[in-house]
Amino acid sequence: MGKARRPVQIIILIFIVILGSYAIGSAVLGNGSEKPQIGDKPPAVKLLGLDGKVHTLDDYKGNAIVINFWATWCTYCVKEMPALQQQWEKWRDQGVVILGVNTGEDKMTVQNFTEQMGVDFPVLYDSNNEAVVRYGVVPMPTTFFVDKKGKIASIHEGELNLTTLDDQIKQLVKP
């Protein structure tokens, strides 16, 4: 058994290096699909919400939409959650929808996190990372601002602070 252990370890190590290289290459180079740009219509996706319903962007047609990709393990995502909640409370009666798209975590983790953080805007699960791929999300958090006409008005990669978030939403709702 001792003589066979070393070659097995080498094979496992080679497999891990190949798999890691593929993952990094995919994240950096993308999967060949076009990443949405400002002025584009955001990619259509169907995602299950924390509320148990399936959500699509068509459900929010005519509203300004803030689509925030996040995860509980992402420090910057956690830090911006209170700002997103505060803006949801401020703007929801003015035709603004904030959608939190959790990337690849289980329902219990997400539900516990949102309860702990006091988040009550719609939270959706991207359990198979379909939306992450379609939107070309690499850094987390990434936020897409969609105007009332259904076009991407701006894209913000990284943590949003309250002032920047408020300014972006003001641009979406102005006549």
Image (cartoon, helix red, strand yellow):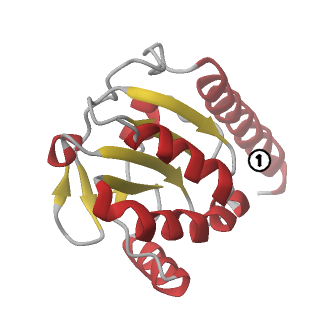
Q: Position of residue 32 (x, y in %)?
A: 47, 13
Q: Position of residue 149 (x, y in %)?
A: 26, 29
Taking the image as shown, residue 7 lies to the left or right of residue 144, namely right
Q: Looking at the image, is 127 positioned above or below residue 37? A: below
User: The N terminus is located in which quarter?
Assistant: bottom right
Foreground of the two, 171 or 124: 171
Q: Looking at the image, is 5 positioned above or below residue 134? A: below
Foreground of the two, 123 or 105: 123
Amino acid residing under circle 1: Ala
Q: Label 1 neighbourhood size at 10 Å, few (<14), some (14-19), many (20+)?
A: few
Q: Is residue 62 visible?
A: yes
Q: Position of residue 111 (x, y in %)?
A: 41, 79
Q: Which residue is mark 1?
A: 4
Number of on-image labels: 1
Taking the image as shown, residue 91 lies to the left or right of residue 41, namely right
At mark 1, the secondary structure is helix
Residue drawn where x is 74% and y is 34% of the image: 17
Residue drawn where x is 64% and y is 67% of the image: 78
User: The C terminus is located in which quarter?
Assistant: top left
Residue drawn where x is 59% and y is 25% of the image: 26
